[in-house]
Amino acid sequence: MPKEEFVLKGTSACPGCSASLALRYVLKAAGPDTVLIVPACCTSVVQGMYPNTAVNVPVVNVGFATAGASASGMSNALRALGKKTNVVVYAGDGGTLDIGIQALSGALERGTDFLYVCYDNEAYGNTGMQRSGGTPLGAKTTTTPLGKPEVKKDIERIVAAHEPPFMATACAAYPQDLFRKVKKALSIRGPSFIHVLAPCPPGWRYPTEKSVEIGKLAVKSGVWVLYEREYGQLAISSPSRTALKNPIPLEEYLAPQGRFAGIDPKTLDILKQRIAKNLQRLAREESGVC
Amino acid sequence: MSVRRRLAMSRPTEGAAGRTGSWRVFLPVIDRERCNQCGLCQMYCPEGAIDEDLNIDLNFCKGCGICANECPKKAIEMVREDR
């Protein structure tokens, strides 16, 4: 693991922010020859105030809906100049699952040589925790005070339908796994996508010191499965493989989070069924049944 | 003046949002007797405020407490800070 830091100390991220933890490792893996493209999201605030910036690589701040399109242009321009600079998009779940989805879809379809990292805190955290397409069923946000009645949008299957050469899921609580996946994604030519779960202390309503713990609980309970799909071949990553031999009950993941306080048993049951179904589907795909 | 100087460009600096250490309510204190130098605190610090020798930069530590929570030896204690 390189010692050089590309996110300098003194960012304006909230204490215990796992998105800035994930960004540290994404940039460590990408190295200094990188251009970071950031649509409107927490990271565009984390950079700090003019005339200073906390990110030690060139950053392009673009409009909410244009991350994929900007990356396409940037990547093609750099390749035309004969440069091998990594183009990395670092976007939140709002800019990926909701507003930026058509630009992402377009960039994947065009086969742009770039890496799209979506850090998912499951709501619009920057503007005050409004519901997004990434908010899971039953989670309270400021616009769904009784819990979200709809299920989380499955962006991974949408991206998988574009058949990119490499896609993966990661979690900010497993930095080494994230580092390895970013390295691998950047070594492959063509579009790649990494979906990172980033627990958010003020939004998910838990104390700041539990950020990493909650991320680990998400993986251990099977809510979040770490895997990678390389040229269509799925491989479940080792933290998930170990955890899923003996998964912890879902309640252990939900209990520390204020956004799931008072969740009704019916919703809990649906959540459990969906997790079981997802695990089954991934296991089947890995063994090559479908 | 060169074009580069005239452009409104942000430059990478430590403390782009000021001395974020002033946000802190609880201060991490490392017990060096218990510490086994595993480096997990350094790995999990979202701020990157812990260096290779596991010294915490108190100018920028926001006091989130992830280091204390993840320490396998429970060598870091969070104490309320007097200001």
Image (cartoon, coloured by chain):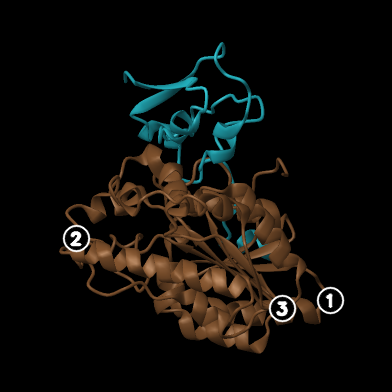
Q: Position of residue A57 (x, y in %)?
A: 65, 57
Q: Marks 1 and 3: in contact by CB < 8 Å?
A: no
Q: Colour of chain A?
A: brown
Q: Marks 3 and 2: in contact by CB < 8 Å?
A: no
Side (left or right) of B76 relative to A249: right
Q: Position of residue B48 (x, y in %)?
A: 56, 39
Tag 2 residue: A265
Badge nearest the viewer, 2 or 3: 2
> In this picture, is A176 found above or below A194?
above
Tag 3 residue: A190
Chain under callout 1? A
Side (left or right) of A121 relative to B72: left
The residue that appears at 43% across and 42% down in the rendered structure is A213
Query: Considering the numbered disc 3 on the image, is that residue within a helix, a strand or a loop?
Result: loop
Residue at mark 3 to residue at mark 1: CA–CA distance: 16 Å
Q: Choose the circle earlier in sequence order: 3 or 1.
A: 1
What amino acid is found at the position of numbered circle 3 in the picture?
Gly
Q: Choose the circle earlier in sequence order: 1 or 2.
A: 1
Residue A26 found in image quarter:
bottom right
Chain under callout 2? A
Outermost residue to the right: A82
Query: Considering the numbered disc 1 on the image, is that residue within a helix, a strand or a loop?
Result: loop
Few, some or many C-alpha atoms within 10 Å of disc 2 (few <14, some 14-19, many ≥20)?
few
Q: Is residue A219 visible?
A: yes
Question: Which chain has been coloured cyan in this picture?
Answer: B
Tag 1 residue: A82
